[in-house]
Amino acid sequence: MTRFSIALFSFVSFQVFSQGTNELRNQLQQIISSKNATVGVSIKNIEDKDTLSINGNLKMPMMSVFKFHIALAVLHKVDEGEFNLTQEIFVKKKDLKEDTWSPMKEDYPEGNVNLTLDKILRYTVSHSDNNGCDILIKLVGGTKYIQKFINEQGIKDFVIKVNEDQMKTWKNLYINTTTPLATTELLEKFFKGKVLKEETTKYLYQIMVETSRGLTWMKAGLPEGTELAHRTGISGTNDANLRVAMNDIGIVKLPNGKHLIVSVYLKDITEKKEDTEKIVADITKAVWNYFIR
């Protein structure tokens, strides 16, 4: 193939891809345009480097998505030999707060029990346990350490200042933020082994695959049995039926073995919960259909 032929082929390929992403962008805009929510989306095919974003630089409240960031910080200390997944942590009764989502509290209502770091991570990441989350934040040295660690990965659009217990206060729900693009960048670095060692990368990826939350969100937009390593986040609503956020971020394995990052954030929502879940599912389905054709 001549140099001219290569250049022409590259140009044609770019034109086809541009037309395709414009088509996908239009589909996504149709999904979100009439909704009572602000939506931010970032998509990247890791191997082919195809990208698309809508409101990608918009600062969005993370909710429990930040449990992914917290897990990265914890597992970095495992990599450094400071922690061990088999080490036991004494969970006091006072650590298991009331009126919060906590499968751990359901299993150990009286607390005062030794649980391995592995078990607390699984509660936190796979099952979005709020008490487990705050135990991990305290374990690594607080939100300032997590902030510094994530910034050191080259992620600047990220703020963590409050834990789950502090987010029981409405105004605090808006404090921890990131952007769809920053999320996608961090997920890609994580997947490529640039944040953690190989063993801890595989470990975190797997417990994200085992996520039991958000089954009607991103997962509902994918064919049954599709591998999805993801982390969800949702707030409650106030008296005016305003929901601060509903988010789902993840890595999808495509049928050809390649991997797709999808970061979906919604904020200031007045849609019904089931309708909001459908927005996330519909976005995911449109993205899936585009990338498998």
Image: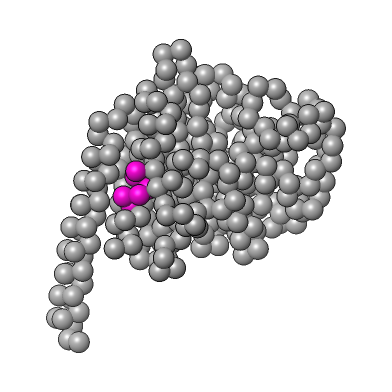
Q: Residue at x 21, y 72 (%)?
A: 10
Quadrant in which the C terminus appears: bottom left
Q: Residue 62: in sight, yes or no?
A: yes
Query: Does residue 6 sit above or below 185 in this rendering?
Result: below
Q: Position of residue 184 (x, y in %)?
A: 43, 50
Query: Does residue 217 sit above or below 16 in this rendering?
Result: above
Magenta residues, dominant SS class: helix
Residues shaded magenta: 282-287
Query: Does residue 63 sit above or below 230 in this rendering?
Result: above
Q: Residue 186: in sight, yes or no?
A: no
Asked if the stretch drawn in magenta spans residue 271, the answer is no
Q: Position of residue 28 (x, y in %)?
A: 27, 44
- Count of marks overlaid on the render: 0
Instruction: Residue at the far bottom: name it.
Output: 1
Q: Position of residue 44 (x, y in %)?
A: 37, 56
Q: Answer left or right for 63 relative to 32.
A: right
Q: Residue at x 22, y 62 (%)?
A: 17
Residue 141 lies in what quarter of the image? top right
Q: Residue at x 73, y 40 (%)?
A: 139
Quadrant in which the N terminus appears: bottom left
Q: Nearer the viewer, residue 118 or 145?
A: 118
Q: Nearer the viewer, residue 262 or 138?
A: 262
Instruction: Residue at the far front: name it.
Output: 224
Q: Answer left or right for 82 relative to 24.
A: right
Q: Nearer the viewer, residue 146 or 42?
A: 42
Instruction: Residue at the far top: name it.
Output: 239
How is the model colour-coded?
A: one colour
Q: Residue at x 18, y 75 (%)?
A: 9
